[in-house]
Structures are given as structure tokens and as C-alpha cells.
Image (cartoon, rainbow, N blue to C red):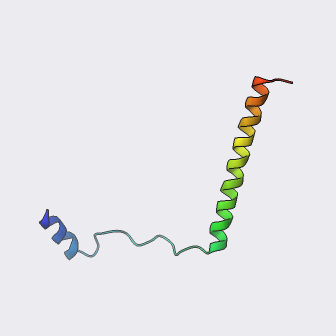
Amino acid sequence: MQAITDAMASDPSRGPPPPADPKRPLWKNLLWFTLLWALGVGVVSAVAYGIRLWIMPG
């Protein structure tokens, strides 16, 4: 197992890749969070309304 660790340490091209993009601004993260939250609430509401109509039509 030591040989694998030595080989990885001696070759800098091996190891974790660098991050693909720099850190996004906070407002973009909050926008995504809000969008995903709203979509989740909408989907749950639509499913609940569909079940309500199925159980108690009219």
C-alpha cells in the first residue's frame, strides 16, 4: 500500500482535480435555493391536490 501512496505523491498530476469553477456569489446560491424550494412546494401541493380530488371527487 505504501508504494501506491508514494507513486501518487511523486506524480502531481494524480490526485483530486481542481474545482471546475470558482465559488458562485451568495445571491446566486440563494436564488437557486429559493427556486428549488418553490418548485418542491409546488410539486407537493399539486400531488396533494390530485390525491384530494381522487379520494373526494367534487
Residue furthest out toward the right: 58
Q: Position of residue 19 (x, y in %)?
A: 45, 71
Q: Quadrant of the C terminus?
A: top right
Relative to 40, is 49 on the left or the right? right
Q: Position of residue 8 (x, y in %)?
A: 22, 70
Splitting the image into 4 quarters, where does residue 16 fall?
A: bottom left
Q: Position of residue 32 (x, y in %)?
A: 65, 62
Nearer the observer, 47 or 3:
47
Relative to 26, is 56 on the left or the right? right
| In the image, residue 49 above or below residue 36 | above
Q: Position of residue 56 (x, y in %)?
A: 80, 24
Splitting the image into 4 quarters, where does residue 9 fall?
A: bottom left
- Residue drawn 65% across the image and 61% down it: 33
Q: Quadrant of the N terminus?
A: bottom left
Splitting the image into 4 quarters, where does residue 3 fall?
A: bottom left
- Residue drawn 68% across the image and 65% down it: 31
